[in-house]
Amino acid sequence: MKKQFLMPVFFTLVLFCSCDDGEVVQTENAAVNTDENHLKTVSATESVTFLKDFQQQQSTQKNANFNLTIDFQSIEQIDITDTDAKLTVVKAETGLDNVDSSILQIRINGELQTVLFNLIPEEGFNNKKTGKVIERYGEFSGAVVVTDLRGAVLNDFIYKSGNLLGEVKSPGPDPIPLNNVNVYPKPKITDIIFPYIKPGYRFRGEGSPTNYASMGVAFASYYATAMVNEIEKRITDKNLTPCQKAVLEKLKANKNVDIARMLARLGANSPYTLNITTGDFKEPATTRYTQKSPISRFDYTTIISNDYTDRTALSLAGNILHEVVHAYFFSLQDQVAAQGSSAPLTEFPALFEVYIQQKAPKGAWMTPDLQHKQMAETYVNAIAAALQEFQTGNSAATSIKQEYLDLAWGGLYKTPVFDQTFPEGSADRSRILNRLICEQQGIDTQNHGGERQYPLGSKCDDYIKSK
């Protein structure tokens, strides 16, 4: 008979403060400075030896809450955001009903930390042995229960529709055996008193209340990374020119800020398909539903224009990244449509508003103008970092140069937040628009007044020759 779970009666939600991308740069610096002592990868050999020893001990002891079956063939090491250390992950079976478990290991401040992460979906979200947990991460609602290898609960994390709400603390210092813990009945909405944390919450490298909480954040990052990698795999190309194809491949292969990591910064958490092709088009690029009638939800096509033959490879990279984000904004609208929303939007400025409404933090302190500014900066920093690495090849940079910020801001041209941030006649607006034109035309320009701008990128013919 399967063991059942009983919900602790009292709990307190502990909110981990999410950070905007300005904070991320500072966090990356902190992680670089502390990684040497704070986090260390546990090698696959060390992990297997440790777990086999545990398995041997488990066979001779009767005080475990379950007999853990470990799949040693599944061992893998996963990147943790903002640190060079990797998380060692091994799949395991507890024998408990409808629980998907993984063993995670890492050294924190020199101490080997080993925990069992158990995904326990709320009723109706059955993922037992389907292999679809990562693909469905954007939909996941339930608990992530962190235990030791014997089943004593260390931490609980509550998710709703792919969003990390916070940490559930049980009363008292003593661990609770897993077979006495349950997510049923699920917390009432009145119990959830804090706003959602943005999906893709990343390991910060410092400031976590406990080592086990650090492991919890690393886990959230692991699944978010898996999701955006799945999205990147679904970006396909067809009939692209050699230059267009080379630029797309390099954007996927960036070491530090590739397309997947850019989407992670934006909070992407649900897979979609993007087909990138080329054709004659008046604008540099456009994105639309692959099929218009009936609309093909979560399936989009980007057309890159063949007419802009003088633009630099950097300009082309900016176009591609912008359209990848455009497709992501479509997916947000489609998530709303799945709940019975109105007719679909198509223009980027309107879809950007959908992004703000769904992703911006909510609260009495957050005014509409501040929401727009924060989400605009999230978009800008995510794209600018990818563009800078594309152009310079420097994956270790912790600050973004103005030219790449300007190119990214140009993607928000004609949105209300752009006009509010850079009003007509301002020097910043002139600089941004001149930067867009000089990369788009491959020549220096001063068309919008202000200082003359010179292209950073090389034209496509020269870019291909240099590869």
Image (cartoon, rainbow, N blue to C red):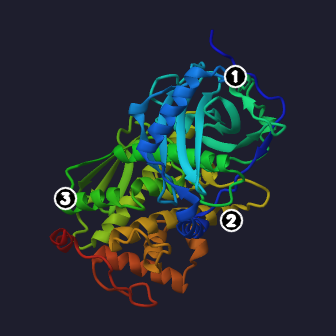
Residue type at mark 3: give it. Answer: Thr
- Report helix, strand or loop for mark 1: helix
Q: Which mark is residue 188?
A: none
Residue placed most toward the observer, 339 or 103: 103
Residue on which disc 1 sits = 179
Residue drawn at (36%, 56%), measured in percent from left and top?
286
| Residue 370 vertical position relative to residue 296 in the rendered view, above or below | below
Q: Upstream in the sequence, badge 3 or badge 1?
A: 1
Residue on which disc 2 sits = 370
Residue type at mark 1: give it. Answer: Asn
Residue type at mark 2: give it. Answer: Leu
The answer to which image quadrant residue 116 occupies is top right
Q: Upstream in the sequence, badge 2 or badge 1?
A: 1
Residue drawn at (45%, 44%), measured in percent from left and top?
46
Please say if the residues under marks 2 and 3 sit with CB atoms less than 8 Å apart.
no
Residue on which disc 3 sits = 241
- Report helix, strand or loop for mark 3: loop
Q: Nearer the viewer, mark 3 or mark 1?
A: 1
| Residue 210 vertical position relative to residue 30 in the rendered view, above or below | above
Q: CA distance from mark 2 to mark 1?
A: 45 Å
